[in-house]
Image (cartoon, rainbow, N blue to C red):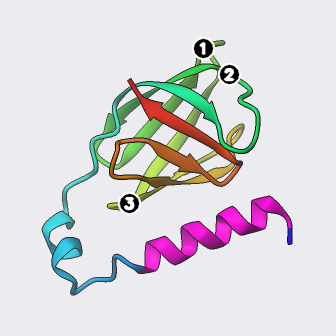
Amino acid sequence: MSSKSVYVSLVAALATLTLPGSGHAQAQQGAATNLAGAYRCQPEPSPCPWPTMSIAQTGNTLELKNDKGVVADGKVTSPITISGNPPWNAIGVVLPDHSIQWSNGTKWQKQ
């Protein structure tokens, strides 16, 4: 199994932990996770194509931007998951330390 498949499977498994009806999910319904800010890439386990990124957020809509000015649209898909459109093409899990573990093998740590 490829490492990308493992990460996608991990994201899917973690997303199922926040099912409607659970106390955490009910508390978060209607409230988007605040992801806006600056991030630094940590190579875990894949190398980082860019050292710094930023996220701008309006509700559940995201704008992902790297330090070279490349921009991608994204979405908050649950209280703990996000998706990034091309050129990222990745699913992210929002971790308790405000970092994002991406299905492409990188981790963005909020600064």
Is 21 or 3 nearer to us in this picture?
A: 3
Among numbered discs 2 and 3, the one appearing first in the sequence: 2
- The residue to which callout 2 is attached is 50
Residue at 32% over, 61% down: 79
Is 16 or 85 nearer to us in this picture?
A: 16
Q: Residue furthest right?
A: 1
Relative horizontal placement of residue 76, taking residue 91 as reference (left or right):
left
- The residue to which callout 1 is attached is 67
Check contact, mark 1 vs mark 3: CB within 8 A.
no
Helix, strand or loop at disc 1? loop
Is 65 or 50 nearer to us in this picture?
A: 50
- The residue to which callout 3 is attached is 80
The amino acid at mark 3 is Ile
Check contact, mark 2 vs mark 1: CB within 8 A.
yes
Q: Is residue 44 above or below residue 83?
A: above
Residue 74 place in picture, x, y as percent: 51, 44
For marks 2 and 1, give the CA distance.
7 Å
Q: Is residue 46 magenta?
A: no
Q: Which range is magenta?
A: 2-16
Q: Is residue 107 above or below residue 56?
A: below
Q: Residue furthest bottom?
A: 21
Q: How many marks?
A: 3
Question: How many other residues sit within 10 Å of disc 2, few (<14), some (14-19) or many (≥20)?
Answer: few
Residue at 77% over, 59% down: 4
Residue 61 place in picture, x, y as percent: 39, 44
The chief SS type of the magenta part is helix
Q: Is residue 68 above or below residue 29?
A: above
Relative horizontal placement of residue 35, taking residue 12 as reference (left or right):
left
